[in-house]
Amino acid sequence: MKSVFQSPVGVTAQRTRRDPRAQVKILLLKAMVAAPNGGEGWAGLSHDQWGDVALLTRQHRLEAWAGRWLADKTGVEVPHAIAQRWTRAYRQSAMRVLAMRAMLHRLSLILGSEKIEHAALKGAYLTWHCWPEPALRPSRDIDILVARTDARRAFDVCKRAGLSEVPEYHVPFESALAKGKHLPLLRDDASGIYVEIHIRLATPGEIITEDRIADFTSAALSRAQAHPLGDTAMRYLDPTDTLLHLIIHGAYDHLFDNGPLQFGDLRFLLNSHNVDWHRFWRDADLLGCRRACDLVFAILRRLSPALVAGHPLAGGGTVPDHVVDAALINSLPDLDRRFEVRLRSTWRELDWAGRVHLSAVRSRDAMRRFQQMVQRSGRSALWLFGQWGVRRVLAVMPWRSTPEFAAESDNYDLLRRWLSDPRP
């Protein structure tokens, strides 16, 4: 099977050679954007490789999709225990998306009662209007976009309707309003569904500045399209704005470590809707994110040339192979250690003042979450630290000294530097 990793030298190629899960990761990445009958490479997997498939599909919420995608592949025999788990995952996902749809309907009524202009983002639209079956795309929360001037009203009306703030992820309202993409996280306690009220479509930074984000957010909200939802309607970003928002989210907010699901979202969006490419590239230039768009389309072209055939995707920039490799590797991280890799990469980019600030913020957040864990568990702080804190340190420290850890951190550094380059 041909590898999707093409960099002949450098850290990405070294990382690929060291990664014992590289073949399985390639299969999953290609399957996420491949044609329905593309089952090449799956029939020869070993017992251990199927174990890696099970781990990665669980970590990245791909179990419901994997079970359906492999169901009709000739010669592919999924181990019985894994197949059963995937079947259960599909049933649970089917029930979950129905609960999410009911919550979406409720939010439409809540915000509509106050005449607050709003639009649902990402998963809420992709699940029901792009993917072939809603249950194949996992959903964890609902993202709703409102104008910044309506932020307080939207937040308050949702709380009056029964949603509550989540103490584990508490951020002061004014701080979120001034700098964040979304307001403090809300949860519906009855269903367990989380709701994020967004006021920006990107996080302000050196490349995508606050004024650019404000203009794009306002324009995208005004272009949102209404779709029937029970006895009401929900507005969603149109396909062109959704495509650009997905790229910004994956590239700048996550450096692609939000998993292969992002490529499935792009695949089904491109296959099911027309994109206004003139407006897309105009807005990409206005935001300053053409490089991210070029990189995403280079990834899709690498994974599945047939997917991008016929689309005017070229933005004029050439993306080096080693940058595409780094993004692909980042898109299937081990989620048990992703936070440590991110932290190391961020730490290396900061000056001494930034490191002091980051240490203070992380210490404050860790102390607050630890106190909440103590309150929920009913145990003493000393006992909980011994059971959780020490065990985590002992689990993480041996791995932090490995070459793989350094290589993964280097991938983050490489992508951050390349995406931050102002050149086209």
Image (spheres, helix red, strand yellow):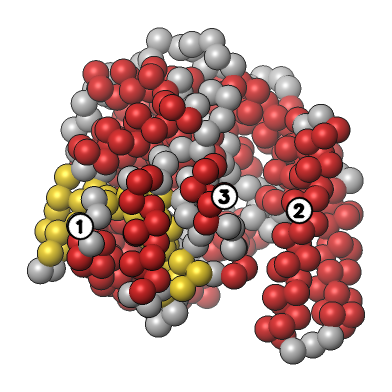
Determine the residue positioned at 59% across, 63% down.
170
Q: Residues within 10 Å of mark 3 (few under 14, many from 20)?
A: few
Between 18 and 410, the residue placed more toward the observer is: 410
Quadrant of res 369: bottom right
**Circle 2 — which element?**
helix
Nearer to me, 419 or 171? 171
Residue where numbered disc 1 is placed = 115
Res. 138 image quadrant: bottom left
Sequence-wise, which precedes: disc 3 or disc 2? 3
Question: Residue 378, position in %: x, y?
Answer: 74, 89
Residue designated by label 3: 175
Q: Quadrant of residue 316?
A: top left
Instruction: Reply above or below: 64 against 375.
Output: above
Q: Residue at x 68, y 50 (%)?
A: 338
Amino acid identity at mark 3 = Ser
Q: Position of residue 270 (x, y in %)?
A: 27, 36
Q: Residue at x 76, y 71 (%)?
A: 370
Residue furthest bottom in the image:
378
User: First in sequence: mark 1 or mark 3?
Assistant: 1
Q: Which mark is residue 362?
A: 2
Answer few, some or many: residues within 10 Å of disc 2's Cα (few below 14, many 20 plus, some between 14 and 19). few
Can see residue 287?
A: yes
Mark 1 surroundings: few (<14), some (14-19) or many (≥20) residues within 10 A: few
> What is the C-alpha distance between the residues marked 1 and 3?
25 Å
